[in-house]
Amino acid sequence: MTDTAFKGEVNLDAWLDRHHVKRVRTLATDLDGYALGKYCAREKFTKGLPIGHNLADAALGSDSESTPHLGFWHTFRRSVLGDIALSPDLSTLVPDGKDPDLGQVICDFTFLDGRPISLCPRTKLKQQVEKLDALGLSVKCTFELEFFLFDNSFDDAERKRYQNLSPVGASPLQTIYLLKDSFRAVSFMNEVLKRLEWFGIPWEAWNDENGMGQIELNLMPDEPVVMADRVVRAKQIIFETAVEQGLSTTFMAHPQPGFSNGMHIHHSLLSNGRPQFFDEAAPRNRSQLLRHWLAGLVETMPAAVSYLCPSVNAFRRLREFAAPPVTATWGEENKSTGIRLICDAPKTARIEHRVGAGDLNPYHALAAILAGGLSGLAAQQEPPPEFTDLAWGIPASVPRLPSDIMTAAKALIDCEALKQQLVPEDVEYWIKSRRHEWMTFHRAGNDPDSPVPSLWEFQRHFAAT
Amino acid sequence: MEQLFSVVTQSNAAPMELNLARILRNSLRQYGEQALSGLPAAMILKDTKTRLKLRLLVNPKTGITVSRAGLKEPAFVEGQFDPFSGLPPKFELRGGWRKPFMKRRLARLFQPTLTPWQTAAEDFYNATHLLDPNEFTIESYSEETDTRHLWGHGPEKALILGDVATLSHLYNGYSQLIDDILKGRIQCQASMRTIAIITDATTSQWMDLQ
């Protein structure tokens, strides 16, 4: 490994020397999308290559409080508590920029011999990309990150039990794009953007969002695994910058009544680098490939909700007239439907999937979307009619999205197309992990319909999501 | 022709609501339309652990619909239906039930049906699709009565130890094995995989996913 050329240097050691890297932080996301990893001494890191370092298999087989999944099983686990590996993807190795001695690398969960574990969220996304590759297709995509920024530190927020926090911006108006609110967040965002640039994460724009203290950050599109890696890194950077500045941030889906964090996902398909959604000769410029892809997305949308809204908290967001979609519908330039199609020009033609919550795991969410599209290509169906009205407050005959974590799990159980694309055993394990979330939520005596999220939800999601 | 009754819960029903629905379904199955005749059209029930209030709409022809009620509505039935407590669901009727026949019917409606634990265990293991008798040998044992139940003949062995009440609630589908294990009410000696698969099967049974 250390004998081959690496990123313009003669080998990895030369690259580590050039960048003064003495320690490397490994990072992978668990099922819930939480960033896990270790700080490794450089020697330990290089010695472990290419497989990487060990960690407990419970890292992939436990909930977000590290309570092992004792009540259901996956074949990647051993009959006793064992180890798996965190295998670095060296193409993602970068110097930290802030910490002069630190390198950062994104990893996959693998078996100790380096074989991939299908359940690993990043591996799951790679599986879908490979299927598209076999069809001669590639994907260009991006995520819209929404988060709340508070003047309170994380410790202070916890002391206040996450209530009555002071949003940065703090005009009493819930006005979107208000520059006076944005200005209050400039010093924070400038530091975030500086670090994003250092990590090689190009961004497009950021703005004050609707909620008080809410910010939206848009990243430049790229291929799926790269983009999901960037989202994970951007979230970590935003968290770390907040800690350093004595502030707090949250990607929690629904931290306050009336306002939620979403994570809309834009994507388009390409073949040999050429966009495939726009066809001048087709009715309304919608290519046949786009129509089949769209049909798959709409059909699997209720099932994909389980991955797009992974927590009990995320379902507080899906309310009529509250901006997020509540129906399995699509429409061109319609921001109230589950899918917004933009098909105005070859280069900008894309699909915006608007169901995703701020706490989604980007690998899982994108994998579920691509799997849905792939099932549409396989079935070669036409999409249901376009929804041209406002998709809230409409008759019950319009298919609704699942409104709670168990209904979403049930929709996924019943969706053979998505199960087959995403590997049945992995989907079943995921469903059982959602059942575990639901049980744990209720075991603590919480009410999913309470007007304010429970302390349990804040403790589970506010800082760690 | 036998009349079929249903108990419908809302889509985001809590575990305690599912336990309550199971009790009501069993009562309807056992007593048929007699269980519903003469009951008020609506009743408010309070779960003492979660403090949630539920509205039970009774239709003598179709069954019962369970939905959430406002916190200030007075409850006529108070009960503990939580599946995580390790106790059997229990309830009491609050004032206003002066008619003895009504009280009897309500008591019967909310009374969980418990079959002897060994019979319930046999039914459970035979019904589950997650456990293969050629792979597992599962022994359940109650020390206090020296009673046991053996299922399967496979090489993967498991021993489930608990008192009669706990085993009875578990195999009748009113509690959660994972909670019973974590809280020390049941000892389950087996590999992690075997424990996980048995637990999964009991949870699936409890959620009517068998």
Image (tube, coloured by chain):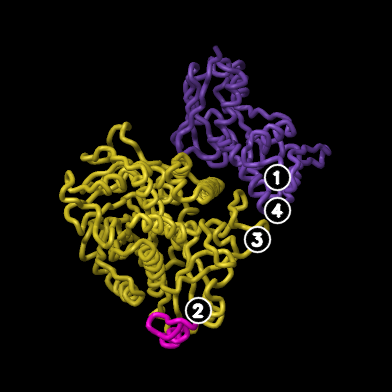
SS state under label 1: loop
Residue A379 visible? The answer is yes
Q: Chain of mark 4?
A: B
> Residues under labels 1 and 3: Cα distance?
21 Å
Q: Which residue is mark 2?
A: A1
Q: Amino acid at mark 2?
A: Met
What residue appears at the point 74 percent right and 40 percent down from the top-left corner? B152
Q: From the top left corner, tell me how far across and down residue A21 is, in percent.
A: 46, 84
Q: From the top left corner, tell me how far across and down residue A180 is, in percent.
A: 21, 65
Q: Which residue is mark 3?
A: A81
Q: Which chain is purple?
A: B
- Figure colour of chain A: yellow
Q: Amino acid at mark 4?
A: Ser
> Residues under labels 3 and 2: Cα distance?
30 Å
Secondary structure mostly seen in the magenta stretch:
loop
Residue toward you, A231 or B153: B153
Q: Residues within 10 Å of mark 3 (few under 14, many from 20)?
A: few
Q: Indicate which disc residue B135 carries.
A: 1
Indicate whether A261 appears above or below B40: below
SS state under label 2: loop
Is there a contact, CB below 8 Å, between mark 1 and mark 3? no
Q: Chain of mark 1?
A: B
What residue appears at the point 33 percent right and 61 percent down from the top-left corner? A145
Label 3 vs label 2, nearer the camera: 2
Q: Chain of mark 3?
A: A
Q: Which residue is mark 4?
A: B191
Is there a contact, CB below 8 Å, between mark 3 and mark 2? no
Is there a contact, CB below 8 Å, between mark 1 and mark 2? no
